[in-house]
Image (tube, rainbow, N blue to C red):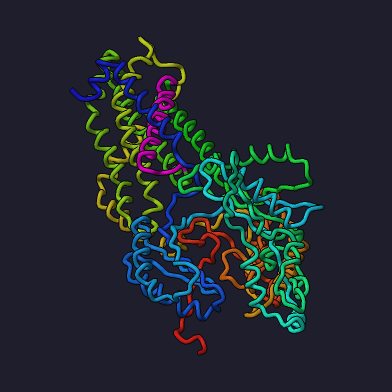
Amino acid sequence: MNISELSLKRPILATVMNILIILFGIVGYSFLAVREYPAVDPPVVNVRTSYSGANSEIIESQITEPLEKAINGIPGIRSISSSSSNGNSNITVEFNVSEDLEAAANDVRDKVSQAVRNLPQDVDAPPVVSKSDANSDFIIMLAVQSQTKGLLELSEYAENVLQERFQTISEVSAVNIFGQKRPSMRIWIDPDKLNAFNVTFSDIRTALNTENVEIPSGKIYGDKTELTIKALGRLTTEKDFRDLIIRQTAGGIVRLSDVAYVEIGPENDEYSWRLNGVNAVGMAIIPQPGANYIKIADEFYKRLAEIQKTEKGDFMMTTLIDQTKNVRASIKEVEETLLISFSLVVLVIFFFFRNWLIAIRPLIDIPISLVATFFIMYISGFSINVLTLLGIVLATGLVVDDGIVVTENIFRKLEGGLPIRKAALEGSKEIFFAVLSTSITLAVVFLPVIFLQGFVGSLFREFGIVVAAAVLISAFVSLTITPVLNVYLNKKDAGHGKFYEMTEPFFKGMENGYKNLLGAFLKVRWLAWVIVIACMGLIYWIGSGLQSELAPLEDRSSIRFQMSGPEGASYGYMVETGDMLLNYLTDSVPEKDFVFAAVPGFGGSGGVNGGTLRIKLVEPNERTRSQSEIAKAIGKKLPSINNARIFPVEEQTISVGLGSRGSLPVQFILQNLDFEK
């Protein structure tokens, strides 16, 4: 007794089994992450070391190079990149996709701990080894501006109000703030006054270290009470710092205000972040690995609306970038494609069977197979993305094949005069191994994708497994619930309808025509080899002339500009250059939505001779030029701004590695042991 016979004898059992796999699929779907493409990024480990007061050459020779030599011996490394700036060393180790992140991080920690003995003894702290998410790109960017408040107040509001609200969103990894100005006490020392009062820099530093402290002061005990003593030793206001005594002698008292000017100012004065030429503070929402982007975005907009409703100040909050729009658009297109596929399947089946009860059965078979596939995706650790949805769309046409084969064989037995139950039993039993072998063959075609190595294998593994799983599940559905549906959804003693009678001559003619054509071709069967060879040659000729790429460049309505000034360029010089480019983009690109600029740029090496600008375009349906056409037109005009090297960057559709989405399509590195050459 095979499973089809069991299902016909126990129809309730067959129904319960199919309902069960639907429930498993629904539960799995609720736990699936939603993102644009599969997570294919390699393990990345970061090593950061701080050595205050050291210049970049000392950082490189005494910290970066010893650590790189120690790390270089770890197996599985794809690349090592480092940057040495004043007071900081940053090493990024990227491993192969197949390596485990935890094991890679442990290997790096072991090597770094062995190399610590070769580092200077007075480094600020031991090197910090941390795991980095190579795909830690922000999904939402928010700009905060005000017409009356300064950057210090904006930064405080963004950190203490907005960051706290957004940080608690489920599945959010971090909320980064750009253009933030933390308040600090800035002391501008006058060398002439130091000489006049015979005071040195060391005297000022010693006074600050000894006086600007807050230490435990103990308790005072009485007969019946005890009081905790709080010594107010921490300097907090400008007046406290001005009144700080630097030196006290018989000749008088020298205070800090006598030799320096004290004011509250930003901690880092050499950083700007502007939106449409106006200073602003930016906030970037970074999701956790495997997070549901749509869920995060929905909760973000909900909380943003609540904040805007209760906020009484003049803070203006603008959502600059929302990467989930692409995900939503992709999912919407897939839903439309699925609807079209369902409709076409029903129409094609009706056209050949000419029976609506048979035609609507795929509306039951297909959803069961596709919904159950979500459970396979869940236990495999996959996500809902463009490629898995593409697999589901492709599987729509494959999963219906088994049901059609079973239904057609039962229908043929029924037309032969057998009772419906007997026809279902004989038809499903006869076709059992054919359905099983066909489904296994289709699954085997896609399963080898599992064994592909590297980036491409990781990218398409989800696609292959989704299609194979859907096909195998469809075989189970076709051999269990499909025969039952044929029994219970078939009208007793129902003859052929008028449409059947009208179209039957056409199908008879088509059948006879195919029979005659096949018979004629078998007389010259040697032509089959000629046709096969010709097709293979045609495939090679056409295929060799086609261009190849991982994925076509999508129009994301965004272009990034990277600025690189001459070595030694000042912060003011780069801000002026950035303003020139910003004004040009504002005036010369009618398709713009907004422009924002950051000096220095994101993820720089620590110098101020860099910058990043991004122009956001209106939606593609609102403009005549594509993103690439606009980028090429702007690129031709950029040489006129010769203060710095500026080039446009269109973000890659699919990327791998740390920061590769915004990189250029082709990159190379020039190396030399002696930079003076």
Q: Is residue 291 left or right of residue 279?
A: left
Q: Residue at x 53, y 44 (%)?
A: 293
Q: Tell me the residue at 26%/24% (across/down).
A: 428
The dominant secondary structure in magenta is helix
Identify whether 580 is placed above or below 492.
Answer: below
159 relative to 83, above or below = above
Q: Quadrant of residue 378?
A: top left
For the view shown, which residue lies furthest in the bottom direction? 677
Q: Say above or below: 348 vs 184.
A: above
| Whole-percent x, y for residue 283 in the image | 63, 52
Given residues 169 and 435, the one toward you in this image is 169
**Span shown in magenta:** 356-384
Residue 181 visible in the picture = no
Q: Which quadrant would residue 529 be assigned to in this image?
A: bottom left
Which quarter shows the N terminus? top left
- Point 28% across, 51% down: residue: 528
Q: Quadrant of residue 555?
A: bottom right
Asked whether 15 or 129 is in front, the reply is 129
Q: Is residue 373 one of those drawn in magenta?
A: yes
- Magenta segment: does it hold 232? no
Q: Horizontally, is 573 left or right of 44 in the view?
A: right
State whether residue 340 is above or below residue 593.
above
Which residue is farthest front?
Answer: 223
- Residue 259 x %, y %: 76, 75
Which residue occupies the foreground of this view, 15 or 254? 254
Q: Position of residue 370 (x, y in %)?
A: 40, 34
Q: Residue furthest left?
A: 1
